[in-house]
């Protein structure tokens, strides 16, 4: 079985400058050929708001999706086991897809994938834009910040998780305290404004 996660950008005003909003922006609502309406048994909505719609897609081996529309641009993350690795460690393939009246396929393009080996850490960094973050599984980890607060230990995550973070994050770092590779996909949504979004 192949699992994929379709991250559909629902609000085109967030992903391009003013002059580009009309071109290729798609519709405000899905049409009658939307894949969720056509194939609800394989396409489940995880998050749906005015910025993003996230679908969890589970296709049995050898199956095909029916012809369908895609009214918004999307990032498709294909999630499969990594040969010879523990089941928690995955192979990811990313594709960017433009809106189209009849979806037949898409060109390959990478999205930011985060990988941290056991006992290694990310360098201190920030996130300026709202983000969708996808985890398949996560080892235990320790998150540190630059505000003087003690690090926070996070337990192992044993199931898929998708989060939508509609705020900027201050300087932080992450130490992998587990026994397998820490993996995540972060999809950052660029607002039209140059100002960072602050947490409410």
Image (cartoon, rainbow, N blue to C red):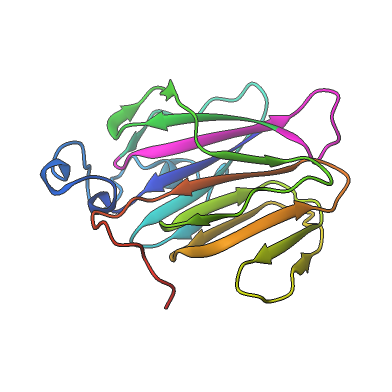
Which image quadrant: the C terminus? bottom left
Asked if residue 1 can be seen in this view, the reply is no
Quadrant where the image shows the N terminus: top right
Identified at 59% across, 49% down, the residue is 134
On screen, residue 180 versus residue 94, left or right, reads: right
Quadrant in which residue 26 is drawn: top left
Q: Which residues are magenta?
A: 71-90
Location of residue 106 by image quarter:
top left
Which residue appears farthest toward the right when viewing the image? 179
175 or 58: nearer the viewer: 175
Left or right relative to 170: residue 193: left
Left or right placement of residue 196 versus residue 47 in this view = left
94 or 55: which is nearer to us?
94
Q: Residue at 48% across / 51% down in the picture?
A: 54
In this rendering, is residue 127 above or below 102?
Answer: below
**Tag count:** 0
Residue at the image point whose x is 39% and y is 62% from the top: 49
**Residue 29 sits above or below residue 152 on the image:** above
What residue do we see at 22% from left, 47% from top?
Answer: 27
Q: What is the x, y in percent for residue 142?
A: 76, 61
When the figure is inspected, residue 138 is found, relative to residue 147, above or below; the finding is above
Please check the rendered image and state whether residue 147 is part of the magenta-colored stretch, yes or no: no
Question: Is residue 127 left or right of 18 when viewed as pictured?
Answer: right
Q: Is residue 86 magenta?
A: yes
Quarter location, residue 52: bottom left
- The x and y percentages for residue 96 are 41, 31
Whether residue 96 can be seen here: yes
Q: Position of residue 141 (x, y in %)?
A: 78, 57
């Amino acid at each position: 079985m192949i699992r994929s996660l379709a991250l559909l950008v629902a609000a085109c005003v967030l992903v391009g400058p003013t002059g580009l909003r009309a071109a290729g922006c798609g519709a405000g609502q899905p049409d009658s050929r939307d894949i969720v309406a056509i194939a609800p048994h394989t396409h489940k909505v995880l998050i749906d708001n005015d910025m993003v719609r996230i679908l969890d897609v589970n296709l049995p081996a050898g199956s095909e999706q029916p012809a369908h529309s895609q009214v918004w641009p999307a990032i498709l993350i294909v999630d499969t086991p990594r040969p010879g690795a523990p089941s928690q460690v995955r192979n990811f393939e990313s594709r960017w897809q433009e809106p189209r009246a009849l979806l037949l396929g898409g060109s390959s393009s990478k999205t930011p994938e985060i990988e941290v080996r056991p006992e290694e850490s990310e360098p201190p960094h920030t996130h300026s834009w709202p983000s969708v973050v996808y985890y398949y599984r996560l080892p235990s980890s320790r998150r540190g910040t630059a505000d003087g607060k003690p690090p926070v230990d996070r337990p192992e995550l044993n199931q898929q998780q998708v989060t939508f973070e509609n705020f900027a994050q201050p300087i932080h770092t992450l130490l992998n305290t587990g026994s397998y590779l820490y993996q995540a996909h972060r999809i950052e949504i660029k607002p039209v404004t140059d100002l960072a979004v602050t947490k409410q």
